[in-house]
Image: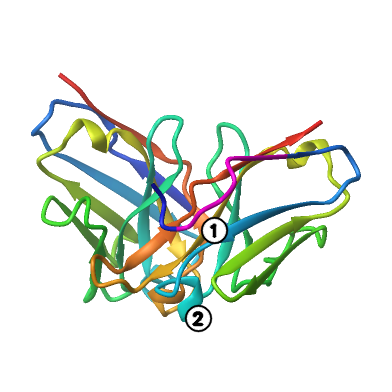
Amino acid sequence: EVQLLESGGGLVQPGGSLRLSCAASGFTFSSYAMSWVRQAPGKGLEWVSAISGSGGSTYYADSVKGRFTISRDNSKNTLYLQMNSLRAEDTAVYYCAKIKDPNIAAAAFDIWGQGTMVTVSS
Amino acid sequence: QSVLTQPPSVSGAPGQRVTISCTGSSSNIGAGYDVHWYQQLPGTAPKLLIYGNSNRPSGVPDRFSGSKSGTSASLAITGLQAEDEADYYCQSYDSSLSGPGVVFGGGTKLTVL
């Protein structure tokens, strides 16, 4: 069964850091680009970041550029999101998602994890 | 304010047909980028409903269909059922110089009357 399982969320103070992980199973992880998408409480979906299957190409939304870093360890079938200089507006459920096609610009997210909650508050 | 514009809410009675619009611009849908649709049931993660404008993943009923024309796209649901009550999101890619990347619509809440 294809599955994505996020972890690492929690409560952090403004200006703090957090690293999210997403463990993948049931598919050849290194063959697919992956992404992070977030959803603030009661709000819509917001794309955060994406990474190619090899890890050689990364993409970020303007709202997180310079603060968040996406990476992956294909030997561990795991996706990461390092989040620094966190702000209150980063409070959201963070989902990892598998990208269906090699072309990230045409990307549909065909598999989603259950999400992990990140709360930025003092 | 989302790059892709969806109506905040739509409603319909069981058995009826409803459509949800997704309006973009020349830097996203109008530039030829594909549109994808997701269904999010309350308290759950989004689920891919339509990809590549009009394709259904395995397991998605044929009551759901998608189309695209010009700078807009639409999701149609026929034979409305109570279990279809959910939030629906469109998604595409935007190539604008101000910040290229994946973009979502603001979401549409479907209420089955």
The residue at 41%/60% (across/down) is: B103
Residue A90: image x %, image y %?
Answer: 25, 38
Residue nearer the viewer, B30 or A51: B30
- The residues colored magenta run B4-10
Residue B51: image x %, image y %?
Answer: 60, 68
The residue at 69%/59% (across/down) is: B75
The residue at 42%/40% (across/down) is: A115
> Residue B5: within the magenta?
yes
Name the residue tied to disc 2.
B32
Categorize mark 1 by other alpha carbons within 10 Å: few (<14), some (14-19), many (20+): few
Residue type marked 1 = Val
Residue B15: image x %, image y %?
Answer: 91, 44
The residue at 84%/41% (across/down) is: B81
Categorize mark 2 by other alpha carbons within 10 Å: few (<14), some (14-19), many (20+): some
Name the residue tied to disc 1.
A2
Q: Is residue A36 left or right of residue B85?
A: left
Q: Secondary structure at mark 1?
A: loop
In the rendered image, the vertical position of residue B105 relative to residue A74, given as above or below: above
Q: Is residue A23 left or right of residue A44?
A: left
Q: Residues under labels 1 and 2: Cα distance?
A: 30 Å
Q: Which residue ends up furthest to the top in the rendered image?
A: A122
Q: Secondary structure at mark 2?
A: loop
